[in-house]
Image (tube, rainbow, N blue to C red):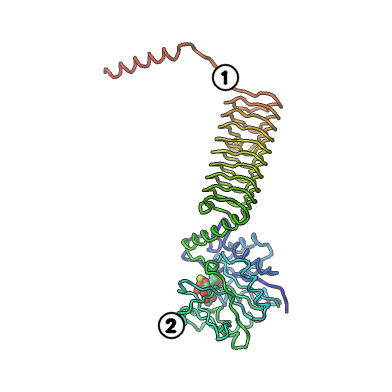
Amino acid sequence: MSTETALCLLAAGKGTRMRSDLPKVLHEVAGLSMLGHALKSGDGCAPSRIVIVTGHQSERVADAARKLAPSVTCVEQSPQLGTGHAVQMAAPALKDFAGDVFVLFGDTPLIRAETLEAMLAARRGGADVIVLGFEAAVPGGYGRLILDDDGGLDRIVEAKEASAEELAVDLCNSGVMCVPGPVLFDLLDKVTNDNAKGEYYLTDIVGLARAEGLACAVVRCDEEETLGVNSRVDLSAAEAAWQARARIAAMEAGVTMAAPDTVFLSHDTVIGQDATVEPHVVFGPGVTVEGGAMIRAFSHLEGCTVASGAVIGPYARLRPGADIGEGAKIGNFVEVKAARFGKGAKANHLTYVGDATVGEGANIGAGTITCNYDGVLKHRTEIGAGAFIGSNSALIAPVKIGDGAMVGAGSAISQDVEADALGITRAPQDNRESFAAKLRIKLLEIKARQTKK
Ligand code: UD1
Ligand code: MG
């Protein structure tokens, strides 16, 4: 018996109820397409081959699939004649495949990898066909799993075909199955479309397997895992369930969150032990926060790294390429893009730092802007270690501020400032004695004349 596994992902459906130009399986949960989530679930069976069945906007789905997993084989199903017909489309790609085939749906993003491991264990335990089932709170339109007297799986009945007695069963079909490849395709050849929907039902293979004396078994999972997305409302429910799971995983890994329900994570967010995430923080894709860092309230991070001991926010924005060093501080209303902050460097208030390096211990005053864009090209700003940039300065890139240099507040710096030098571009101050008092009298006289008229 081959111990290899293959994954067959069904993603041909149109997803009419999404009301979208984007194919359903490319809609995202936590910043990753549902197709990507299904592939991640599939990791649980360590597949040596992956076949994706596409149909609606086939090329677009296939392109996305190849980006996620370059080795996938995409096959097109056209027209779409049911789930059994869809799996049959994978037969040529798996014709020499002797191992177990897992069938997963592309619009079911919450199946845990561990659940597939449990199904694989059940397969190794001897049953030929393994079906993933769940106890549904509202069984509705799901296929019902009908058990035999020994607790084995006897057949699956689609809701449209079910008798009143069968409809009363609350053990339902998730759609996920595990069957040895040769058995699967042999059984599918025998499936007909003689049913209420006129479709080839994948689920019919269970009854056919039993008729041939094969053993079928159910592995159960929580209903939440099987949540399938058909509409934007379902999509938001999947997002909520995914977030709830990810927040718990983060806290269990040692992250402090005072109000986890207000924190939004991405599919690939990495947060180290003893980091703190205050309320209302949003993580876009590609963020790594090291242990011991502090992300304060109302901050937005994407595509960035934050080293230990750094403090971000409140109200900070870290954009792609922000690399915040150990113990550095990025304060309120500070935006950082494609910039490295060295150890202990600070930009505490109202600043934009983009396409820049900020040396260790440098201090960027409130209101400083790196003017990195001339309308056509982007340019770099380099700020040396221990430099001090006075408030409200414009650093007009390309420009270098040397180690230990200072920039006077309010300067517009377009030429390099050498190490330990002061760069300043302010006009000299001119104080005029009693000028304000005299001016005020004049203004009051004008006002008096105007009110008389
Ligand atoms: C299916 C199951 C049902 C189960 C339910 C769980 C069958 C016959 N029924 O019903 O027992 O309780 O899922 O959600 O399998 N697809 C294709 N090509 C097709 C038809 C479907 O690729 O020709 C894909 C869809 O894009 C979708 C998946 O297969 O990802 C399931 O199809 P869907 O029509 O939603 O099946 P259900 O009627 O929900
Ligand atoms: Mg469905």
Which residue is identified by label 2? 164
Q: Residue sitting at 63 percent across and 43 percent down?
A: 322
- CA gap between label 1 and label 2 equals 89 Å
Left or right: 174 with respect to 7?
Answer: left
Q: Amino acid at mark 1?
A: Ala
Say if residue 79 shows up in the picture: no
Instruction: In this rendered view, identify the residue nearer to me: 352 or 192.
Output: 352
Q: Secondary structure at mark 1?
A: loop
72 above or below 360?
below
Q: Position of residue 263 (x, y in %)?
A: 53, 51
**Tag 1: Cα neighbours inside 10 Å, few (<14), some, or many (≥20)?**
few
Which residue is identified by label 1? 427
Q: Secondary structure at mark 2?
A: helix
Q: Earlier in the sequence, mark 1 or mark 2?
A: 2
202 above or below 307?
below
Q: Position of residue 117 (x, y in %)?
A: 65, 70
Tell me the quadrant of the picture where the C terminus can be found. Answer: top left
Q: Residue sitting at 64 percent across and 72 percent down?
A: 118
Q: Amino acid at mark 2?
A: Ala
Dot in front, 1 or 2: 2
Instruction: In this rendered view, identify the residue nearer to me: 449 or 129.
Output: 129
User: Based on the displayed image, in which of its 4 quarters is residue 425 positioned?
Assistant: top right
**Tag 2: Cα neighbours inside 10 Å, few (<14), some, or many (≥20)?**
few
230 above or below 384?
below
User: Based on the displayed image, in which of its 4 quarters is residue 164 positioned?
Assistant: bottom left
Q: Position of residue 449 (x, y in %)?
A: 30, 16
Q: Residue sitting at 67 percent across and 73 percent down?
A: 93
